[in-house]
Amino acid sequence: MRLERQSPCKINLLLNILGKRADGFHELETVLQPVNVCDTLVFERISQPAIELTCNQPSLPTDATNLVYRAATKFLEATKPATGVRIH
């Protein structure tokens, strides 16, 4: 099964970092402007319970430091499927 979705982009017109939260993320104050540009995310089930992340932009990490990978990890932990996911 293959699922393709658009992830809309934005520009931060104002971004103030207010402090670090206990979960490692930062508390933010921001003003955003949506722009008519999107990333395309493609999801496919894989038989082994794992996450495979690929990207056509070599400068982006594809390991657990990537936010897409981290979001997929949280989702799989919460849903406990028998299969994994390949994300590009």
Image (tube, helix red, strand yellow):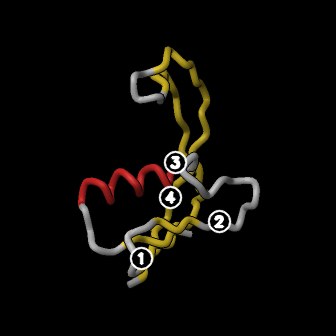
Q: Which residue is mark 1?
A: 3
- Mark toward the start of the polypeptide (4 vs 2): 4
- Mark toward the start of the polypeptide (3 vs 2): 2
Q: Nearer the viewer, mark 1 or mark 4?
A: 1
Q: Nearer the viewer, mark 1 or mark 2?
A: 2
Q: How many marks?
A: 4
Give the residue type that dot 2 points to.
Cys
Residue 79 location (% of width, % of height): 24, 60
Label 4, residues with CA under 10 Å away: few <14, some 14-19, many ≥20: few
Residue 23 location (% of width, % of height): 40, 29
The tag on residue 7 is 4
Q: Residue furthest left?
A: 79
Residue at horizontal 51 percent and vertical 26 percent from the top = 30
**Where 50 sits versus 32, above or below?**
below
Quadrant for the C terminus in the image: bottom right
Identify the secondary structure beneath mark 4.
strand
Q: Which residue is mark 2?
A: 55
Label 1, residues with CA under 10 Å away: few <14, some 14-19, many ≥20: few
Q: Nearer the viewer, mark 4 or mark 2?
A: 2
Residue 45 in which image quadrant? bottom left
Give the residue type that dot 1 points to.
Leu
